[in-house]
Image (cartoon, helix red, strand yellow):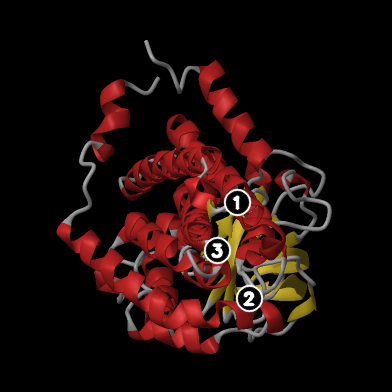
Amino acid sequence: MVGADAVASPAMAFELSEEMQALQSSVRKLARDKVKPRAAEIDRTGEYPADLFEAFRDAGLLGLCIPEELGGSGAGVLGLSIAIEEVAKYSNTAALMLLLTRLPTGPVLIAGSEDQKRRYLPPIAEGTQRAAFGLSEPQAGSDVMGMRTRALPDPDRPGGWVLTGTKCWMSGVREADWYTVFAKTGDPQSRAHDSVTAFIVERRWEGVSVGRTDKKMGVRGVDTGELLLDGVRVPPENVIGEVGGFRLAMLGLNSMRPVVAARGIGLAEGALMYATDYVRQRAAFGKTIADFQGIRWEIAKCAVDIEAARLLTYRAAAMSDAGRFHKGDVPFLSMAKYYAAELAVRASGLAVQLLGAAGYMEDHPTEMWYRDARQLTIVEGTSQIQLDLIGRGVIDGDLWWD
C-alpha cells in the first residue's frame, strides 16, 4: 500500500527550482530560435535534423539524465521532461531526439555495471554516440513476452551469448551506435519473466544490421525501423543486470512515463497557443472568432487539461528521480503518460477545428500536430495498457485513498 506521505513527498513544491527555471528558459529560447523554424521542413522531407542534434549537444541537453560524474548535468528525468516539453511545442521529432538520450540508457542507469556506465554513458552525454531501445517485435508489441529473439550461450566464450532475431519499430535505429536489446535466454515459448535478459549490442559488431525503415504518418525525421540480429556474439560484460532480468525492461519503461508525457504536454501547448493566436485575429460575423463564448470555453477546457497534465507529469518525474518506479508507483506514473498522450490528441484536434479548413492544410502546423499526437498514445505502452496498469493499481490497493 502506498501511503499519502509517500505519494506527496516528492511533489509538494509546486514551483520549479531556480536551476530548473533557468533550464526551462534556456531551452525555450533554443526551441524558438532553432527548432520552430525547422519543424515544417523536417516533417516534409523526413530527413534527420543533424543541425538540431548539434544544437542540443552544444547546449548540453544530451546528458540531462546522465549523472555529472559520467559527463552529464544530473538534471534527471524532471530536467529532461522540462526540456522536452519546450521542444515539443514545435517538433515532436526534435523532442524524440532528446527522449532517446534516456530510453536506451535507462536500463544501464538502473542496473548496469560501473564498467558499462563508464563505457557507454559519457559518449551519449557528449553527443559522440547515440543509442536506441529494442523491445518490440512484429508479433510482440504490447505482448512483450511473445518476443522470439533468442540468446543462446556462446559455446566459445563462457558467460557470452549469441543473439538471433528481429526487433521492430525502433526509433533512431539508423543513427544509433549501440542498442539496449531484450532477448529470450530461457525457453522461447516461456512467458516467465526470468526467461528474458537485457544486453548492450554495438552497431559495429558482426551480424548486426538495420532492416527496413518504416513510412510513418508523423514524427518524421527520426527513422523508425528494424534491427536485425544474425548470430551476434555478445560478451558477458555486456549483459545488463542479471540473466533473467525482464523486470528491468518494465522498470526502465516505468521510469520513462513522464518523459513521454512531456512530449504530449508540449504538443498540446504548442497547438493551443497557435490556435488561440489564430482565433484572436480571424474575423467572422463582424467580430473575431475569439469573441464567441463557445470558442473561449473550448480553449479554457484545454488549458485546464494542460495544467492538470503538467502536475501529473512533474510529480511522476520527481518520483522517477527518487527511484520510485516500482509496482506501487506504477499507477501514478501511468496516469501522467495516459493523460498527457490523450490530451495531445484532443488539443491537436481542437486546434484543427478552431482553424477550420485552414487547419487541415499544410500551410499551418496544426495538421502536423494532429498526425504526431497519435504516436504518443501508442509508444512505450498504449493508452489502453496504461489504463490497465492504473486499474490494477486500484484493485491491488497500490492506489487507494483510505
Q: Residue flagged by tag 1: what amino acid is it? A: Phe
Q: Is residue 380 above or below residue 128?
A: above
Query: In 3D space, how far apart are the residues under numbered discs 3 and 1 (Cα atoms)?
Result: 66 Å
Q: Residue flagged by tag 3: what amino acid is it? A: Val
Number of marks in the rendered image: 3
Q: Position of residue 18 (x, y in %)?
A: 16, 59
Tag 1 residue:
285
Q: Quadrant of residue 282?
A: bottom right
Q: Nearer the viewer, residue 186 or 170?
A: 170
The secondary element bearing badge 2 is classed as loop
Q: Quadrant of the C terminus?
A: top left
Q: Most extreme residue toward the front, as rendered? A: 286
Mark whose residue sits in front, 3 or 2: 2
Tag 2 residue:
222
Q: Is residue 214 left or right of residue 303?
A: right
The secondary element bearing badge 3 is classed as strand
Q: Nearer the viewer, residue 157 or 305?
A: 305
**Residue drawn at x 59%, y 70% as measured from the top left:** 132
The secondary element bearing badge 1 is classed as loop
Label 2 Cα crowd, 10 Å radius (few <14 / some 14-19 / many 20+): many
Using the rendered image of the protein, determine whether residue 152 is visible from the camera's viewpoint.
no
Q: Most extreme residue toward the left, as rendered? A: 18
Q: Earlier in the sequence, mark 3 or mark 1?
A: 3
Q: Position of residue 213 (x, y in %)?
A: 78, 75
Q: Is residue 178 left or right of residue 67?
A: right
**Residue drawn at x 77%, y 41% as measured from the top left:** 190
Q: Position of residue 359 (x, y in %)?
A: 66, 62
Tag 3 residue:
239
